[in-house]
Image (spheres, rainbow, N blue to C red):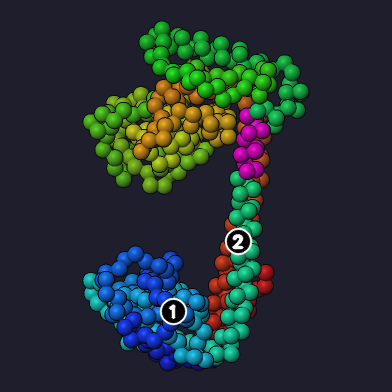
């Protein structure tokens, strides 16, 4: 094991201009990316390329001002080209160092630390070739390197196979979740439940009670009649659900509203700390609320805009911009508030116990529900949903007790999906750890590498 050496003992500068090159290959203009390494580029700063530097297979090129973020590449086999003279080009000395292992080192955490250690400058640091040569390294003998490199290729192949399998598992898991939700909102998950509970009150009676409560609220001028579009596209066939279920528009069972833009600009100043959390589009995730990066308003402002406050279980819908159509369930015990890009769908006063919000959320996450949400969205520069289009969403509503049974069934199955997700993440982590163990052996000495 070589110890106390510098990189300069393994590499040599290779500075050949196109005008001086004697090769026969056609040379294309190349660049270096911290993601893709050596890659084609359209950033040609001069029509005269005679001063550009030639790179051949197994040569390194790096941007001295960006190598600290991994902008270094190794020219692949059968690749010949030129790079800007602003780059530095070098090779490893034959029989001393395997180029691919050096590339791994330069892009590793330890390698980047060494690069930053020897880079010069104040405002913008640069690593000259002489500085690169000063980097301290601890490579094994060339024979050991060859053994390590062969092992690395085997691990990479196995890792690629494992990654392909992991991606397949992720796709299958996504399909499984969608299938669970689709089966749930068609009543197939609770077929046995219905057989055991034949006298359950049908959804039509449930709707009568909700309509009576809504009519009274309108009569008492506590609620305005919504403006529903009645979209001509009928996406849900009457024969696709049990006969004691009902197809009901959102406007018939939920109060839908948003925080108007003029209200926002006039009254709200979002703060990083405050009394009342505000739900923005980035906080609305499928089913749940992401509580990271919350902003706040004061209680006085929230009370002033009480219509847009969140004080009871409801659905939150992103209706404009990124994440449009995402739906989460609000079920906090304290007061929250809407931001201008999120609408709420909440039960009418007095109807909170007549509808299961979690069931409605599962419905809107199902393939049928997603079609209902997106049936109104137009392909414009910034797609959006109006409140009237949200009110026009058709729900499939089972009897109340069956709604609860469906939620229980779905949650049980989703917990099993979560366990599968955790197993997939563990497989990904193990694959990454295996590759790190091989590289650690190359740079720090012999280590035990776990086989897959």
Neighbour class for label 2 at 10 Å: few (<14), some, many (≥20)?
Answer: some
Q: Position of residue 350 (x, y in %)?
A: 49, 17
Residue under numbered circle 2? 163
Q: Which of the pair 144/236 is nearer the observer? A: 236
Neighbour class for label 1 at 10 Å: few (<14), some, many (≥20)?
Answer: few
Image quarter where the C terminus lies is bottom right
Q: What mark, if any, has residue 218 been given in the picture?
A: none
- Write the start and end of the magenta stretch as one range: 175-185
What residue occupies the far top of the structure in this picture? 219
Image quarter where the N terminus lies is bottom right
Q: Position of residue 89 (x, y in %)?
A: 37, 81
Q: Is residue 313 left or right of residue 176?
A: left
Visible residue check, residue 301: no
Residue drawn at 50 percent across, 77 percent down:
78
Distance, label 2 to label 1, CA atoms, is: 36 Å
Residue drawn at 52 percent across, 91 percent down:
95
Q: Which of the pair 299/428 is nearer the observer? A: 428
Q: Is residue 331 left or right of residue 418?
A: left
Task: Please tell me which of labels 2 and 1 falls first in the chain.
Answer: 1
Give the quarter of the image for residue 92: bottom left
**Up-down: is 195 above or below 172?**
above
Q: Main secondary structure of the magenta part?
A: helix
Q: Position of residue 109 (x, y in %)?
A: 44, 73
Residue drawn at 60 percent across, 55 percent down:
167
Q: What mark, if any, has residue 25 been given in the picture?
A: 1
Q: Position of residue 226 (x, y in %)?
A: 41, 16
Q: Please tell me whether mark 1 sits on a helix, a strand or a loop.
A: loop
């Amino acid at each position: 094991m070589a110890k106390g050496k510098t990189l300069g003992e393994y590499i040599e500068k290779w500075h050949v201009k196109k005008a001086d090159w004697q090769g026969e290959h056609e040379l294309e203009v190349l660049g270096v990316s911290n993601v893709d390494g050596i890659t084609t580029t359209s950033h040609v700063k001069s029509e005269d390329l005679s001063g550009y530097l030639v790179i051949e297979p197994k040569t390194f090129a790096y941007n001295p001002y960006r190598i600290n973020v991994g902008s270094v590449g190794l020219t692949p086999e059968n690749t010949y080209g030129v790079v800007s003279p602003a780059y530095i080009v070098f090779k490893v000395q034959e029989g001393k160092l395997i180029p691919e292992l050096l590339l791994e080192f330069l892009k590793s955490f330890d390698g980047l630390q060494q690069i930053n250690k020897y880079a010069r400058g104040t405002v913008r640091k640069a690593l000259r070739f002489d500085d690169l040569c000063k980097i301290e390294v601890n490579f094994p003998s060339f024979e050991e390197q060859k053994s390590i490199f062969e092992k690395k290729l085997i691990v990479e192949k196995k890792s690629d196979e494992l990654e392909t399998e992991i991606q397949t598992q992720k796709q299958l898991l996504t399909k499984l979740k969608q299938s669970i939700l689709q089966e749930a909102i068609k009543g197939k998950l609770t077929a046995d439940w219905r057989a055991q509970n034949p006298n359950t009150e049908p959804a039509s009676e449930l709707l009568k009670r909700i309509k009576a409560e809504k009519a009274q609220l309108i009569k008492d001028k506590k609620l305005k009649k919504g403006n529903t579009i009645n979209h001509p596209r009928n996406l849900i066939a009457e024969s696709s659900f049990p006969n004691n279920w009902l197809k009901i528009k959102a406007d018939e069972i939920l109060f839908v509203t948003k925080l108007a833009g003029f209200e926002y600009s006039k009254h709200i100043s979002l703060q990083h700390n405050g009394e009342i959390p505000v739900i923005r589009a980035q906080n609305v995730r499928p089913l749940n609320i992401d509580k990271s990066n919350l902003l706040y308003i004061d209680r006085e402002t929230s009370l002033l805009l009480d219509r847009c406050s969140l004080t009871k279980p409801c659905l939150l819908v992103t209706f404009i911009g990124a994440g449009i159509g995402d739906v989460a369930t609000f079920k906090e015990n304290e007061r929250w508030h809407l931001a201008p890009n999120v609408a709420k769908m909440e039960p009418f006063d007095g109807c909170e116990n007549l509808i299961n919000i979690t069931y409605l959320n599962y419905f809107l996450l199902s393939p049928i529900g997603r079609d209902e949400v997106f049936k109104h969205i137009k392909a414009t520069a910034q797609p959006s949903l109006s409140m009237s289009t949200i009110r026009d969403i058709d729900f499939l509503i089972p009897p109340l007790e069956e709604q609860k049974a469906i939620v229980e069934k779905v949650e049980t199955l989703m917990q099993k999906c979560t366990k599968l997700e955790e197993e997939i993440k563990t497989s990904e982590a193990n694959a990454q750890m295996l590759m790190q163990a091989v590289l650690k052996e190359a740079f720090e000495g012999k280590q035990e590498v776990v086989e897959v």
